[in-house]
Amino acid sequence: MATKTTINFDDEMEAALDELAAIDGTKRLAIKRSLLAEVKRRRRSQAILDLIASWEAEDGPIDAEHLAWADAVLDRQGVGSVIVDAGPFIVDGEQVNSRLWALIKRATERGDDLHTTHPVLAQVWRDPTRQANLARALRSFDIHPLDESRSVGRRLAATGTSDVVDAHLAVVAQSLGTFILTGDPDDMALLDARFEVY
């Protein structure tokens, strides 16, 4: 059952809302919805950081080497987001002390957006009773449906490749202006995608 959230502003905030709406023509309701979406994103980010902190309190911190790797990847790309291919989820989705979880931690601390796709999840998801940490990790990701089929088909045709899942990742990454974290650099290079090797 859906719940309704009401956002009430004081006079100063109402005036700021009116000014913002006048500057760019955005409707007040759209601005309030954007604000609510940002609050939900921040709650989700805080929840994943709290989860990682509880694991670290129990099992020790994520290795400094993993964190340094994550920092280097995010610094090198410098785009404020990343889209993750199946390989990192398969290799390290259940291992909290891993490069994947270090990347999730660092990206979340920086306010970077984490993305993946439904086709990637289809490749990864097998047994929810054995993938609890993966399910937790995915709470911090925006998951994109395969709804750009024509663009994906054009990318496949242009590159002479046939992997729909990888082509979809390339199309989504390009539309987001981000890079793909992948274990398949050869495939991504063929697709002319921006990527980092996991």
Image (cartoon, rainbow, N blue to C red):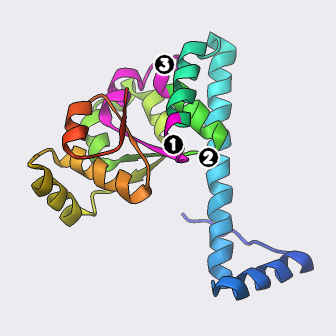
Amino acid type for the residue under numbered disc 1: Arg
**Residue depth check, mark 3 versus mark 2: number of the one nearer the observer:** 3
Local packing at callout 1 (Cα closer than 10 Å; few below 14, some 14-19, many 20+) is some
Quadrant for the C terminus, please: top left
| Pointer 3 with pointer 2, Cβ within 8 A | no
Question: Is 129 on the left or on the right of 43, as rendered?
Answer: left
| Pointer 1 with pointer 2, Cβ within 8 A | yes
Amino acid type for the residue under numbered disc 2: Arg
Estimate the x, y position of residue 37 in percent, counting from the top left: 62, 62
Start-end of magenta stretch? 76-100
Estimate the x, y position of residue 162 in percent, counting from the top left: 10, 46
Which mark, by number, is residue 98?
3
Amino acid type for the residue under numbered disc 3: Ser
Local packing at callout 2 (Cα closer than 10 Å; few below 14, some 14-19, many 20+) is some
Which quadrant holds residue 55? top right
Q: Is residue 125 visible?
A: no
**Residue depth check, mark 1 versus mark 3: number of the one nearer the observer:** 3
| Pointer 1 with pointer 3, Cβ within 8 A | no
Under tag 2, what secondary structure? Answer: helix
Residue marked by disc 1 = 139
User: Disc 3 and disc 2: Cα gap in Å?
Assistant: 21 Å
Examine the structure image and report whether residue 105 is included in the region drawn in magenta: no
Instruction: Give the mark nearer the N terminus: 1 vs 2.
Output: 2
Under tag 1, what secondary structure? Answer: loop
Which mark, by number, is residue 44?
2
